[in-house]
Image (cartoon, rainbow, N blue to C red):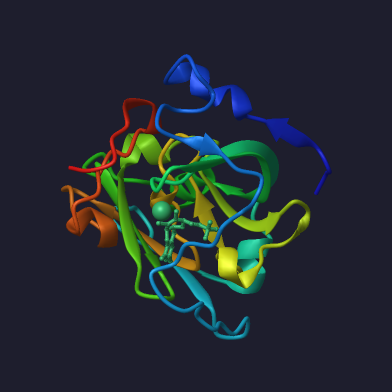
């Protein structure tokens, strides 16, 4: 692994004119937002699964997951409750790497992420197949703190942060759209911060 950091903070230009999406304010803090308590995990029994519309369903132990090709990126973080944090440095596995290993079927259109706390979130496949969507285990060069989703979380700098499942332990490729935890409760499935897609 190298110490190279890829700066993807210019990503907003694809979606809007402003780095800070409308209706957001910038914060230096990194608040914790979870629907419940931080779950325990055991590196010995932890498993990550890739299931659904794929050529080959995959299971990774913690050790195996950590051996996957990874990168470090500087990216922004936008919470739907109105705060944004710039220049977050996350290290992890880009989504396309996992998709390639599993061999996604042509019939797949959507992805459901699941997590140790029972959280789920859904996102269109095309919105997942981006280098910026990371399964991250480090933040600012340190192990991801448990409250922020350690051992492993997803980050989605092009979407509101509820699309990034903390404590993620599986993804399922779907042939039809389904709604995740907040999406069932009225939050947007597409969640583009520059369009202020907060609810749907
Ligand atoms: N597993 C899980 N992932 C989650 C959540 C959660 O409650 N459980 N909350 C989401 C929400 S609403 C936000 S804004 C971000 C917050 O991440 P943070 O606590 O690191 O700031 O995590 C998202 N991922
Ligand atoms: Mo959130």
Quick one: 176 or 68, which is closer to the camera?
176
Up-down relation of residue 90 to residue 75 (above or below): below
Q: Residue at x 42, y 21 (%)?
A: 15
Residue 162 in the image: state x and y as whole percent: 40, 52
Quick one: 191 or 102, which is closer to the camera?
191
Quick one: 183 or 133, which is closer to the camera?
183
Q: Does residue 72 appear left or right of residue 119 in this picture?
A: right
Residue 179 in the image: state x and y as whole percent: 20, 55
Res 131 → quadrant: top right
Residue 34 in the image: state x and y as whole percent: 44, 67
Residue 58 appears in the picture as rendered: no
Q: How many marks?
A: 0
Up-down relation of residue 43 to residue 53 (above or below): below
Q: Does residue 110 appear left or right of residue 13 in this picture?
A: left
Q: Residue at x 19, y 58 (%)?
A: 185
Residue 170 appears in the picture as rendered: yes
Up-down relation of residue 117 to residue 196 (above or below): below
Up-down relation of residue 47 to residue 54 (above or below): below
Residue farthest to the right, as pictured: 3
**Which quadrant, please, contains the C terminus?**
top left
Q: Residue at x 69, y 54 (%)?
A: 139
Q: Does residue 190 appear left or right of residue 61 in this picture?
A: left
Residue 6 in the image: state x and y as whole percent: 71, 32
């Amino acid at each position: 692994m190298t110490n190279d950091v890829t700066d993807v903070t210019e990503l907003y230009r694809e979606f809007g004119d402003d780095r800070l999406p409308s209706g957001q304010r910038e914060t230096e803090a990194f608040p914790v937002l979870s629907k419940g308590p931080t779950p325990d995990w055991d590196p010995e029994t932890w498993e990550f699964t890739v299931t659904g519309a794929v050529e080959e369903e995959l299971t990774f132990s913690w050790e195996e997951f950590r051996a996957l090709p990874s990168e470090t990126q500087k990216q922004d973080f936008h919470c739907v409750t109105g705060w944004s944090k710039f220049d977050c440095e996350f290290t992890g596995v880009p989504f396309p790497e996992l998709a390639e290993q599993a061999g996604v079927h042509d019939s797949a259109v959507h992805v459901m992420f699941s997590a140790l706390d029972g959280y789920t979130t859904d996102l269109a496949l095309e919105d997942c197949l981006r280098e910026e969507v990371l399964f991250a285990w480090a933040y600012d060069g340190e192990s991801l703190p448990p409250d922020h989703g350690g051992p492993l979380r997803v980050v989605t700098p092009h979407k509101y942060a509820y699309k990034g499942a903390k404590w993620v332990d599986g993804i399922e490729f779907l042939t039809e759209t389904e709604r995740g935890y907040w999406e069932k409760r009225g939050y947007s499935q597409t969640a583009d911060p520059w369009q202020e897609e907060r609810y749907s």
